[in-house]
Image (cartoon, helix red, strand yellow):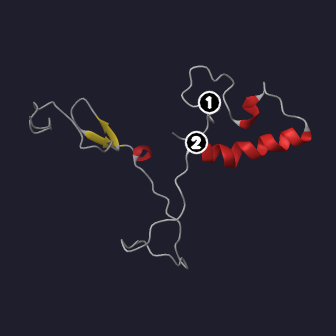
Amino acid sequence: MAEMTSKRGPRTFYKSRGARPAGIITSSRKFIPVRAMIPEFVVPSLEGFNLKPYVSYKTPAGTEQPLNAEGLFAQVVAPQIERDIEAGTFDKEQLEKYGLEKTQDGKLFKLYPKNFVR
């Protein structure tokens, strides 16, 4: 079945095409633009910028490996823990200090940083 659009619905059916209206519609179906609802794009000045906006398909693939949970832990949390162990201030009960969740019960990955975008 075809998608429900404003052409298929009754006269009162109003469905936008994915963009939010930049105003309000009154009870008499008149559109009143609201200046605060109009998006304002802030674009930096690109004078003296050497890079071009196009990336060729012939560009070689990147050399970095994708970041996984173990690599993130090794780069971010492990050095902090090692530094605290050497200083003698590491406490197993204060894992929140390193961005880790206190309880690991029922977790798929143990000691998973809570601020990592999944």
- Give amino acid for label 1: Lys
Outermost top residue: 105
Q: Secondary structure at mark 2?
A: helix
What percent of the width, then of the height, locates residue 74? Answer: 68, 46
Mark 2 packing: few (<14 Cα in 10 Å), some, or many (20+)?
some
Going 66% across and 28% down the picture, which residue do you hit? 101
Q: Which residue bears the numbered disc 2?
A: 69
Nearer-the-camera pick, 88 or 21: 88
What percent of the width, then of the height, locates residue 103? Answer: 66, 22
Say which quarter of the image contains residue 40. bottom left
What percent of the width, then of the height, locates residue 68? Answer: 55, 46
Say which quarter of the image contains residue 82. top right
- Left or right: residue 118 versus residue 76 is left
- Left or right: residue 33 versus residue 85 is left
**For the residues bearing labels 1 and 2, Cβ distance under 8 angstroms:** no
Say which quarter of the image contains residue 54. bottom left
- Residue 87: which disc? none
Could you tell which of marks 1 and 2 lies nearer the N-terminus? 2
Estimate the spatial distance between the alpha carbons at disc 1 and disc 2, rounded to whole Å.
10 Å
Q: Which residue bears the numbered disc 1?
A: 110
